[in-house]
Image (tube, rainbow, N blue to C red):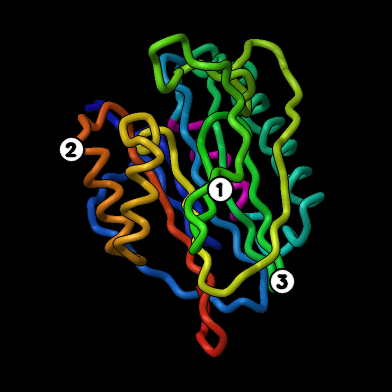
Amino acid sequence: MREHNEDSLVVGPWTLGGTVTDSPQTLLFPLDRPLLVAVADGLGGQPAGEVASALVVRRLAAFGHDLDSPEAVGEALEACNRAVYAAAEGRPEMATMGTTVAGALVLPDSLVAFNVGDSKVFHSSGYGLRQVSVDDSPPPTPGQRTTSAVTQTLGGSHTFSSVTPHVAAFPLTRGDRYLVCSDGLTDPVPEEDIEELLRVHDDGKAAYELWKAAIEAGGPDNITLALIRIGEIGEAGQ
């Protein structure tokens, strides 16, 4: 229902920002080099959210294969935060622009989940669905399932504010899936519905059905998601 898209996406060297599509794209990558997948969601109600989110995904793409550890991811997110503030400096029309970010760095033997803000990363396996990102948001008010408030973002203030990224590493298990998404999916679609859709569907079909569920629930916000599947032994990639 938004007039324009303030979400941006990075998958390896490719970035998307300000675009609209309802057709999932499937990409294959080898497991022998780092792969970064992330979603950035520009802050609504503040100026230039699409500028902030696009800047962050381009920065993350530029880091490329230098992102090879949890420590490198944390440093990259801190650099992105500084870059958002620097881009807004001296430009009143961009003052307080900011963005959330959440993603996964796939390494040959582990996966590093990370976030700043309330965009999310989920791990989907035979044991069900669990969130592996940490929401930077206060508890919802009684009777509410979600909240739009965020306590930490990249940029977002008149004066510089440092961030403490949430970064965690997990063992890489063939066949597991990780969902990276903006709150345009998770606000209208309950977690149990996301879990059921991932149980029933795989790969591009699952991505489409998740998007469709958010649209059918009213589509109140931009919906951006990436579904990562760790290939079985002998397959070429994710």
The residue at which mark 3 appears reads as 109
Q: Residue at x 42, y 70 (%)?
A: 27
Q: Label 3 sits on what residue type?
A: Asp
Q: How many numbered dots are placed on residues in this image?
A: 3
The answer to which of marks 2 and 1 sits earlier in the sequence is 1
Range covered by the magenta-colored residues: 50-61
- What is the quadrant of the N terminus in the image? top left
Mark 3 and mark 1: span between their CA atoms? 25 Å
Q: Compared with residue 53, is residue 67 higher up or lower down, i.e. above or below?
A: below
Identify the residue position indicated by label 1 in the image: 58
Does 122 appear above or below 89?
below
Q: Is residue 87 left or right of residue 140?
A: right
Query: How far from the left and from the top, in percent, is residue 128?
Result: 48, 54
Q: Contact, CB < 8 Å: mark 3 with mark 1?
A: no
Closer to the camera, 90 or 68? Answer: 68
Residue 141 in the image, given as x and y percentages of width and height:
46, 10
What residue appears at the point 62 percent right and 28 percent down from the top-left corner? 154
- In the rendered image, which residue does mark 2 sit on? 216
Q: Please, what is the three-letter code of the amino acid marked with disc 1?
A: Arg
Q: Secondary structure at mark 2?
A: helix
In the rendered structure, which amino acid carries the disc numbered 2? Glu
The structure residue drawn at horizontal position 39% and vertical position 49%, both measured from the top left corner, is: 195
